[in-house]
Image (spheres, grey):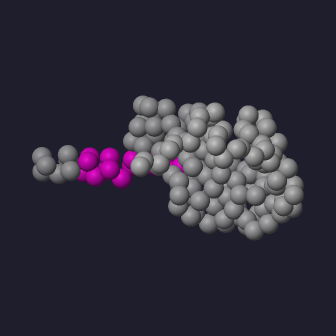
């Protein structure tokens, strides 16, 4: 009889613990883009996936005819992720739901080859790279040194 009360209390405590559900909802414009989260395919937008830890996630979104969107996405501050509070929410007999929403506006793909070359030339100029139209002499390297001579 003495053991029945502690067992009953443990059973009651185990059945009344709380639950925290954490979900990421990803939408895009246009809808129907394929989504990878931390290098795992999770579906097409709009899509929801449960997660365990708050932090930073790798996100890749692709759709034919649109530029792929790739990047690192932080969760931002969430009260549910505060150390101590998250443990209390797991133990207390309450149910909570933490929803993180990300929306991506995709950019139409520009398939014009000359436009691509112009953008590359502009980026090269901004980065301080050399112009590929300028030929470097065969006896001179771009950094001003002479080429290595073969061993005899």
Q: How many marks?
A: 0
Q: Is residue 95 magenta?
A: no
| Residue 14 covered by magenta stretch | yes
Q: Is residue 1 visible?
A: yes
Residue 10, x across and y down, in percent:
26, 48
Query: Where does the magenta region start and end?
Result: 8-22
Q: Along the horizontal axis of the image, is 101 left or right of 67? A: left
Residue under the image location 39 percent in, 47 percent down: 17
Q: Nearer the viewer, residue 43 or 49?
A: 43
Q: Is residue 38 left or right of residue 6?
A: right
Image coordinates of residue 60 in percent, x first then y, are 63, 56
For this view, does 150 lie left or right of residue 31? left
Q: Nearer the viewer, residue 126 or 72?
A: 126
Where does the image place residue 73, in percent across and percent down from the top left? 62, 44
Residue found at x 63% / y 34%? 143
In this picture, is 143 found above or below 133?
above
Question: Residue 78 appears in which quarter of the rendering?
Answer: top right
Rendered image quadrant of residue 79: top right
Give whichever of 48, 56 is nearer the camera: 56
Q: Is residue 35 above or below residue 127?
A: below
Name the spot of residue 45 as percent of width and height, x first: 70, 62
Spot the residue most to the front.
152
**Residue 67 vs residue 131, the one in the foreground:** 131
Can you tell which quarter of the image residue 139 is in?
A: top right
Q: Residue at x 64, y 40 (%)?
A: 140
Please indicate, yes or no, whether residue 47 appears anywhere in the rendered image.
no
Q: Residue at x 73, y 34 (%)?
A: 128
């Amino acid at each position: 009889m003495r053991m029945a009360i502690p067992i009953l209390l443990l059973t009651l405590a185990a059945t009344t613990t709380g639950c925290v559900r954490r979900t990421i909802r990803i939408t895009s414009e246009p809808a129907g883009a394929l989504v990878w989260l931390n290098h795992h395919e999770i579906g097409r937008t709009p899509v929801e996936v449960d997660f365990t830890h708050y932090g930073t996630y790798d996100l890749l979104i692709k759709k034919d005819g649109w530029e792929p969107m790739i990047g690192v996405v932080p969760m931002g501050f969430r009260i549910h992720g505060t150390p101590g509070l998250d443990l209390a929410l797991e133990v207390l007999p309450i149910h909570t739901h933490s929803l993180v929403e990300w929306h991506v506006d995709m950019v139409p793909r520009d398939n014009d080859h000359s436009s691509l070359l112009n953008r590359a030339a502009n980026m090269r100029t901004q980065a301080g790279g050399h112009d590929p139209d300028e030929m470097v002499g065969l006896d001179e390297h771009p950094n001003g040194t002479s080429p290595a001579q073969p061993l005899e």
